[in-house]
């Protein structure tokens, strides 16, 4: 049993609700459907995001699959996300890692015994996830000294922040973990590994063949998108942000406030500026938004906005069980679609702001 | 010869079986130790910033100090000495532990870090463990939550025939040096500097002003205008050159999760 399995974890916040049409679409476009999609179907952009982000993760060229997997473990451990940790373990087992090897890997990074190049990458991933202190030029210099190229460093930041996103989606919804944890240790998984490894290799080869579409060059998120130039992630992330903001499930002002609170809590001025622009576009005057952010509330907010702001702030750093109880309260107060979208927006904001800070993008 | 070879083979087999069992046992111990280390790392982060916790895990010690802007909350039980003198020691310990439990829950619920318990006094810090742009609001909300929690606790104490406790809270905002402070035998993560001293002195003033929660101007300037406050006359504080103006925090006009 890993130390993480002792972390308190609530029962699931929502019951799964499968959408066969959406799942068929995801299977056709990405080759597979993540189990968490069953909980996200009320917010289609979020369900699609899990596939798109997985796809660009598989299509990274500078990082070895093992480093990508290890970052998944390290960031999930750091965020105390039992679901993602068990999923990552299961995926590694399915790719042929023995239980013994995974345990050795776990032991080596908790005891900081990995070789310096890899250790620098994992430390950086942890730094991106924590954002306390914020990752900066000194961290990138240390990575370069350890032999990582600038392109690889971008991919490290991207992989770490993508895991930040997944960790939050899974934790805020308290996705069920016990079965996954049992499976991730079960010997039967190794029997399936030749087939699973082939499938993952095929998905990776497919992701590497995908073209790099042009990324949006202007708009509130352009600084971040430009910093990812040349990566498929640039266009994916740019589109994802536009779709998330345009989705009508949760009012635009509530989304803007949630994004702004997370940006302020993480000290990400660019993210905050983008969120304030979004608020201004939805009729929330700049000065009023500043006042609201300074106090995480204002008398004139509507009940949804007043509930969203403190919740968004809690998603920056949390103890799983506590935020899951808070999420459950919101799940009963909001329509299901709006609640799932709130989970998506706060997870996306945590990912985007951390990435923005890590890349020190304009 | 055959018997001797058989015996040697048997001895080797036994030795191998023993070595394998030993290997499995050691592997299990290593796994347990690794899980325990991971759990400790997680737990440690509740008491010290992440970077500091990692440094302690890696090197066993940290001499790193850092200037941080924090809000210090100093709380003390008013008129507790006579209660302590006339209460049975076992009961007193139980009463105090119940008090600390409720106060620390109120502090943690508002992103505070319980730094030190001094007798019946509590030093809590906001913005010390992690950067927190809302640390003064959090501290004021925590103070009000402590007040409410104590009112509930007093009802429980009264039902058991025990005297009510009264609270005084002082809040001050400023810069201090955050780090691990203490000796080899007792180390704690705290903030040192005038910010904490002023918060303690302001707490002393709660008796003079007959107010439960007092905040300095530095806190007030960062406070949500929905807090209901009452200005009080500037008062000389021990060790502070100029008289310090304080405001009583009476309530909060709104809801907060």
Image (spheres, grey):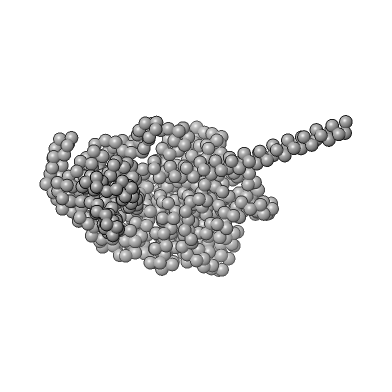
Counting from the top left corner in percent of width and height, residue A280 is at 31, 58
Q: Along the horizontal axis of the image, is A247 left or right of B71? A: right
Q: Residue at x 59, y 44 (%)?
A: A103
Residue B158: which quarter of the image?
A: bottom left
In what quadrant of the picture does the N terminus of chain B appear?
top right
Residue B158 can be seen, yes or no: yes
Counting from the top left corner in percent of width and height, residue B46 is at 40, 45
Q: Along the horizontal axis of the image, is B257 left or right of A4? A: left
Disc tally is 0
Compare residues B38 and A24 and report the one nearer the observer: B38
Q: Along the horizontal axis of the image, is A331 left or right of B31? A: left
Counting from the top left corner in percent of width and height, residue B52 is at 41, 37
Compare residues A184 and B163 and report the one nearer the observer: B163
Q: Residue at x 26, y 60 (%)?
A: B254
Q: Residue furthest left?
A: B233
Q: Residue at x 50, y 32 (%)?
A: A145
Residue A59 can be seen, yes or no: no
Compare residues B192 and B65 and report the one nearer the observer: B192
Q: Residue at x 65, y 46 (%)?
A: A98
Query: In this rendering, is residue B253 above or below B6?
Result: below
In what quadrant of the picture does the C terminus of chain B appear?
bottom left
Q: Along the horizontal axis of the image, is B4 left or right of A297? A: right
Compare residues A11 and B147 and report the one nearer the observer: B147
Counting from the top left corner in percent of width and height, residue A82 is at 51, 52
């Amino acid at each position: 049993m890993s130390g993480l399995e002792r972390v308190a974890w609530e029962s699931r916040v929502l019951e799964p609700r499968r959408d066969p049409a959406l799942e068929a679409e995801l299977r056709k476009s990405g080759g597979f459907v993540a189990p968490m999609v069953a909980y996200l179907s009320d917010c289609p952009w979020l369900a699609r995001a899990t596939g798109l982000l997985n796809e660009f993760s598989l299509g990274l060229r500078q990082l070895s699959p093992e480093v990508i997997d290890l970052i998944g473990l390290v960031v999930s451990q750091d965020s105390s996300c039992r679901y993602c940790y068990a999923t990552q373990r299961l995926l590694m087992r399915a790719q042929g890692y023995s239980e013994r090897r995974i345990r050795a890997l776990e032991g080596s990074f908790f005891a900081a015994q990995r070789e310096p190049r890899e250790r620098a990458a994992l430390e950086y991933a942890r730094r991106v996830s924590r954002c306390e202190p914020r990752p900066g030029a000194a961290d990138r210099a240390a990575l370069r000294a350890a032999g990582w190229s600038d392109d690889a460093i971008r991919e490290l930041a991207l992989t770490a922040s993508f895991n930040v996103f997944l960790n939050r989606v899974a934790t805020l919804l308290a996705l069920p973990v016990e079965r996954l944890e049992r499976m991730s240790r079960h010997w039967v998984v190794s029997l399936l590994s030749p087939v699973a490894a082939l499938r993952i290799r095929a998905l990776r080869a497919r992701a590497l063949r995908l073209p790099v579409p042009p990324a949006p060059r202007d708009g509130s998120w352009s600084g971040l998108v430009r910093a990812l130039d040349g990566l498929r992630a640039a266009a994916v992330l740019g589109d994802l942000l536009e779709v998330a903001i345009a989705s009508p499930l949760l009012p635009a002002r509530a989304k803007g406030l949630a994004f702004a609170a997370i940006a302020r809590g993480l000290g990400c001025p660019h993210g905050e500026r983008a969120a304030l622009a979004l608020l201004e576009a939805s009729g929330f005057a700049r000065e009023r938004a500043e006042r609201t952010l300074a106090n995480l509330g204002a008398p004139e907010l509507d009940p949804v906005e007043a509930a969203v702001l403190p919740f968004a702030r809690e998603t920056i750093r949390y103890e799983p069980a506590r935020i899951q109880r808070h999420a459950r309260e919101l799940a009963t107060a909001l329509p299901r679609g709006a609640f799932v979208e709130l989970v998506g927006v706060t997870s996306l904001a945590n990912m985007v702001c951390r990435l923005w800070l890590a890349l020190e993008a304009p | 010869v055959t018997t001797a070879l058989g015996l040697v083979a048997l001895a080797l087999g036994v030795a191998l079986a023993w070595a394998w069992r030993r290997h499995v046992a050691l592997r299990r111990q290593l796994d347990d130790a690794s899980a325990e280390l991971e759990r400790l790392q997680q737990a440690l982060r509740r008491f010290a910033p992440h970077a500091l916790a990692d440094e302690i895990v890696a090197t066993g010690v940290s001499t790193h100090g850092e200037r941080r802007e924090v809000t210090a909350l100093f709380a003390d039980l008013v008129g507790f000495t006579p209660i302590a003198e006339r209460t049975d020691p076992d009961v007193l310990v139980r009463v105090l532990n119940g008090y600390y439990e409720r106060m620390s829950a109120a502090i943690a619920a508002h992103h505070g870090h319980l730094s030190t318990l001094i007798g019946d006094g509590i030093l809590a810090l906001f913005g010390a463990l992690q950067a927190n742009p809302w640390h003064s609001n959090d501290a004021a909300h925590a103070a009000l939550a402590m007040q409410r929690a104590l009112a509930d606790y007093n009802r429980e104490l009264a039902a058991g025939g025990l005297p009510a406790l009264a609270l005084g809270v002082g809040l001050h905002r400023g810069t201090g040096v955050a780090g691990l402070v203490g000796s080899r035998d007792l180390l704690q993560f705290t903030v040192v500097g005038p910010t904490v001293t002023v918060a303690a002195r302001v707490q002393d003033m709660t008796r003079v002003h007959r107010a439960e929660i007092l905040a300095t101007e530095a806190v007030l300037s960062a406070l949500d205008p929905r807090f209901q406050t009452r200005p009080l006359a500037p008062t000389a504080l021990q060790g502070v050159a100029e008289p310090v103006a304080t405001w009583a925090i009476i309530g909060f006009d709104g809801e907060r999760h």
